[in-house]
Image (spheres, rainbow, N blue to C red):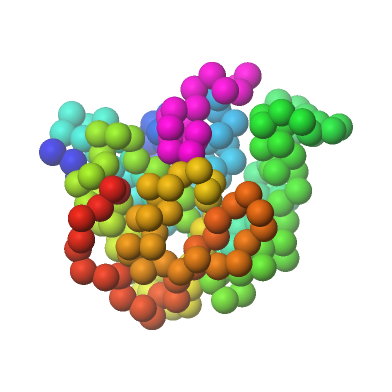
Amino acid sequence: MIGIRPYRFEDREALVEVCVRTADAGQDATGLFDDDELWGLIFAVPYVERHPDLAWVVESGDGTVVGYIVATDDTDGFERWFRDEWWPRFADRFPRPAAPRSLEERIIELAYVRGVGLEPYAAKYPAHLHIDLLPEAQGQGTGRRLIQTLFAELRRRGVPGLHLGMDPANTAAAAFYERIGMQRLPAEQGTLVYGIRLAALVPPESPALD
């Protein structure tokens, strides 16, 4: 039976695994990079380092972590910390590419160029999230429950809104975000951005691909 619980430190390796296995527009990205852990070190682990209290995992009946949601309630603050404190510790392991060409090099470059003031929606939608579920955790309302859990905590903190960016190739995820009431926002070509004002309610339960 699938359950949701708060993140614990010992879940870190499992988060990296889930991140890698869903990083290719929702599909398994294992082997796409020379170092698979790169995915998790950018899109999952820094969030639980900075905000372990805004992270929940999905646990199968045998205790295996099969999904998660991680977030920040302050995008500009998070990006400053990522730039100044988190990513410098990986500079030797992932040197900045001189002229990024491959997907791996472009992802590494993305880590180097993050910083305060680069996210146009950070003022109106200051929170952002990453959510990933392995196939065995999908189609059971788990994604909706994770989102509702996070939104409730953000509302409790008085956070006015949340945004997220995603790969347009992940059409199932885009449909899910629209079903839970998120609105598509203007974005650069090659990406999708959704936002929600947290005063709005998540719609009632409905059939989901989550």
Q: Is residue 80 above or below residue 107?
A: below
**What residue is drawn where x is 55% and y is 28%?**
37
The residue closer to the viewer here, 91 or 105, is: 105
Using the image, determine if residue 144 lies above or below residue 154: above
Q: From what the image shows, is residue 190 above or below residue 11?
A: below
The picture places residue 87, in percent across and down from the top left corner, at 68, 41
Residue 18 vs residue 166, the one in the foreground: 166
Residue 28, image x, y percentages: 44, 28
Q: Position of residue 48 (x, y in %)?
A: 47, 47
Left or right for 93, reference 37:
right
Q: Among all residues in the image, which is located at the extreme left?
A: 1
Which residue appears farthest toward the right when viewing the image? Answer: 98
Decide if residue 99 is on the left or right side of residue 169.
right
Q: Quadrant of residue 95?
A: top right
Q: Is residue 22 above or below residue 93?
A: below
Q: Is residue 209 left or right of residue 189?
A: left
In the image, is residue 63 part of the stretch drawn in magenta?
no
When asked about the image quadrant of residue 178, the answer is bottom left
Q: Residue at x 26, y 70 (%)?
A: 203
Q: Residue 112: tell me if it is visible.
A: yes
At horizontal 86% and vertical 32% (from top left) the residue drawn is: 98
SS assignment for the magenta stretch, majority: loop
Residue 159 in view (yes/no): no
Percent across and percent down for residue 177 are: 39, 59
Residue interval drawn in magenta: 20-35
Question: In front: 187, or 126?
Answer: 187
Residue farthest along the bottom direction in this orientation: 199
- Quadrant in the picture for the N terminus: top left
